[in-house]
Image (cartoon, helix red, strand yellow):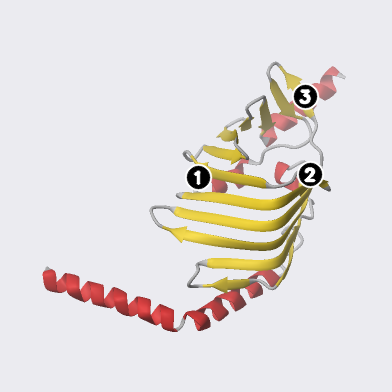
Amino acid sequence: MKKFFIIFVFIISALFLLIILYADNISEKLTYNLNRNLDVDWGEDHPEISKQNMKVDLLDLSVKWDILNIGFNNRQRALIINSITKIQTNKCIANISLLLNIQIEMKCDEIRIDYKVNNWVKNGDMNISSTFFFDRRVYDDFYDKQGSYEVKINTQKLYLNNTNHGQQLIEYSFEDNKKILTNVNGRYISLTKQNEGLRIHTPEKYFFILNKNYFNNTIKMDKTRS
């Protein structure tokens, strides 16, 4: 057993030495592959991506870029994921830590998000979306296959529809495969996936985005009443 352990440690040490020795070459290949994949035109139903000076550093386990813009074509009607029309990030670096779980920390000089305004209907203590609906199939992949990781996003400037909200620290992690716990500058928000849709609980209010079937049924009921 002792001999096996010594051999195992030797193999691991050798692999680490090889990685350190060829880190620059591996980083260049990873950078090339990442940029090439982002340059692929995946078709009109996928976001359009443009970037500048994106680089991978293997030793730091990091990816940095000067500009990364993501444009959404919004061809599908009324999907909540299509409420966002554009995301722009400037001077960012994302570090990955592989310890007990995966931790991703991204720091940016500036993040800009353009989005379509949602309309909400008051129903008791809850606000229900009347503009967009929740596509459960999309979120099933995000929630059910999320794994174990935590994300931190720190930006010096956050623009929402050209309004600067200043420095923002956003952290989120999965409590389970149905709930995300989010901390935005000390304010906790939970996003819970349910059969009926997505429930959003802020310190002050409740919001609900209905899934497609409930959304369509609600629209039919409104038309019938009118």
Looking at the rendered image, the disc whose residue lies closer to the viewer, 2 or 3, is 3
Residue at 67% from the left image edge and 52% from the top image edge: 155
- Classed neighbour count for the residue bearing mark 3: other residues with Cα under 10 Å, few (<14), some (14–19), many (≥20): few
Q: Is residue 109 above or below residue 26?
A: above
Q: Secondary structure at mark 3?
A: strand
Q: Residue furthest right?
A: 226
The three-letter code of the residue at mark 2 reads Arg
Residue that numbered label 3 is attached to = 121
The three-letter code of the residue at mark 3 reads Val
Residue that numbered label 2 is attached to = 77
Q: Is residue 78 above or below residue 9?
A: above
Residue that numbered label 1 is attached to = 144
The three-letter code of the residue at mark 1 reads Asp
154 to the left or right of 163: left
- Classed neighbour count for the residue bearing mark 2: other residues with Cα under 10 Å, few (<14), some (14–19), many (≥20): few
Which quarter of the figure is the C terminus placed in? top right
- 3D distance between C-alphas at marks 2 and 3: 19 Å
Asked where in the image residue 87 lies, by quadrant, the reply is bottom right
Q: Position of residue 143 (x, y in %)?
A: 53, 44
Say which of 200 and 15 sits in front.
15
Mark 2 or mark 3: whose residue is earlier in sequence = 2
Is residue 177 visible in the rendered image? The answer is yes
Q: Position of residue 198 (x, y in %)?
A: 62, 34
Q: Are marks 1 and 3 in contact (CB under 8 Å)?
A: no
Is residue 161 visible in the rendered image? The answer is no
Q: Position of residue 70 (x, y in %)?
A: 74, 59
- Classed neighbour count for the residue bearing mark 1: other residues with Cα under 10 Å, few (<14), some (14–19), many (≥20): few
- 3D distance between C-alphas at marks 1 and 3: 29 Å
